[in-house]
Image (spheres, rainbow, N blue to C red):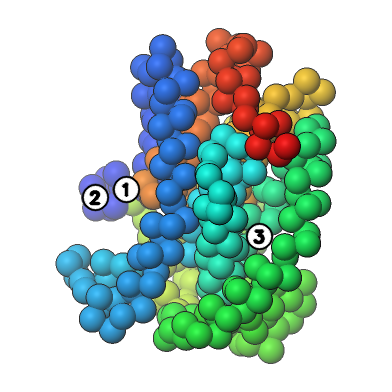
Amino acid sequence: MNFGIIETIRDSFILNYIYFVFIILLFQDAIQDLLKSIFNIYKYYPVILFSLYILSLNDFLGNISIFGDVHLLFFKFGDIGVHLFVAFILQLTSLNQYKKPFDLINYILIFILFSVASSYSRSGMLSFIIAFIFFYYFLNDKLIKTQLKSFIKFMPIVFVISLLFLSKFKVADNFQGRSVGVEQVALNFTSIFSTSDEGGLNDNKIWRLLWWGQIIDYTFNGPFFIAGKGLGINLAEDDQILTTDLEGELRSPHNFSLSILARYGVFIFCIWLYWIYQQLKLITTPSLSKLQLVLICIQIAFLFNANFDVFLEGPMGAFPFWVFVGIDLVFNYFKLYDTMLEKDLFNMTKEKYE
């Protein structure tokens, strides 16, 4: 009651987006068609995103603003890294199929866009990499693993094309001082494990870690153990977190799990972690199907990015994430992973490889 109603409602939606899961239950009789339709969106995602990015480099088109100061062609590169992983994994498993040479062209576009996204976002880069590691480790399909090994001989060509693109299309630095380029990608990656020469990267890590530690302290060891600080409150102001990069815009700690901890307390936080454990432990199932593996790895990519960026707090991340969760739950509940319907989704894998 002490805070604005709009802010309170907005903060509550970090959990209210879960209702998308129950919306998916209404489509249980057409779940296969719904899933194929969603996959079809990702089929054209790389080429559409690449085209829009090229348009954004134009001085006029790139600065068109309809909603205040937010450009119409504004890209959130952490989110892009996640969606590129979805597009990549769907093509790799033949859930999305392309005629030659468009299959190779699409892989090249994904790699180029991934390089661009990695220049701007460490979380997007790592979300792609971590989710792919899980996919490869738990994958039982020798054909797909053999196909991945065959990609290695094309990697130098793809790398050269990406290098030429990054060197040709130079764009202005973003608000954190990052620009597109091979050097920036290398800095973003190495800064994860060490102190980077670029101050902005180090500062970005420092204020996050300090804030996350503060949240853990005043919940587990402080007065907000049971219910957290609640909804409507600006956590950045109340916790006295000051950053020049996001001054006036920072509200939540760029970590979805810690946002739940700070606003709802330890009990809800533990329930959230337990749900993640229950949802993702199925990846160790010996009889895990390829479709189930794909959906679990997609959730891993979303969850990883959400714990380093503001992602699941808004509809742009929450809507697709909870839709994928709902589809996974429907498939599990009705045991559709073991039916011929799922096999039909993968019936071209062997033919495509051969």
Specify few, some or many for label 2: CA neighbours under 10 Å numbering under 14, 14-19, or 20 or more.
Answer: few
| Between discs 1 and 3, the one toward the N terminus | 1
Q: CA distance from mark 1 to mark 3?
A: 28 Å
> Residue 96's spot in the image, x, y percent?
53, 39
Q: Relative to residue 117, is residue 338 drawn left or right?
A: right
Residue under label 3:
126
CB contact under 8 Å: marks 1 and 2: yes
Residue under label 1:
10
Q: CA distance from mark 1 to mark 2?
A: 6 Å
Q: Name the residue at 17% across, 67% down.
A: 66
With respect to residue 330, does 121 lie above or below? Answer: below
Q: Name the residue at 29% across, 76% down.
A: 62
With respect to residue 55, does 168 lie above or below? Answer: below
- The local secondary structure at tag 1 comes to helix
Mark nearest the camera among 1 and 3 is 3
| Between discs 3 and 2, the one toward the N terminus | 2
- The local secondary structure at tag 2 comes to helix
> Residue 86's spot in the image, x, y percent?
55, 46
Specify few, some or many for label 1: CA neighbours under 10 Å numbering under 14, 14-19, or 20 or more.
Answer: some
- Name the foreground residue: 70 vs 216: 70
With respect to residue 24, does 74 lie above or below? Answer: below
- Name the foreground residue: 192 vs 7: 192
Residue under label 2:
6
Q: Answer whether residue 279 is visible to the viewer in this image.
A: no
Specify few, some or many for label 3: CA neighbours under 10 Å numbering under 14, 14-19, or 20 or more.
Answer: many
- Name the foreground residue: 244 vs 81: 81
The kind of residue tagged 2 is Ile
With respect to residue 134, does 341 lie above or below? Answer: above
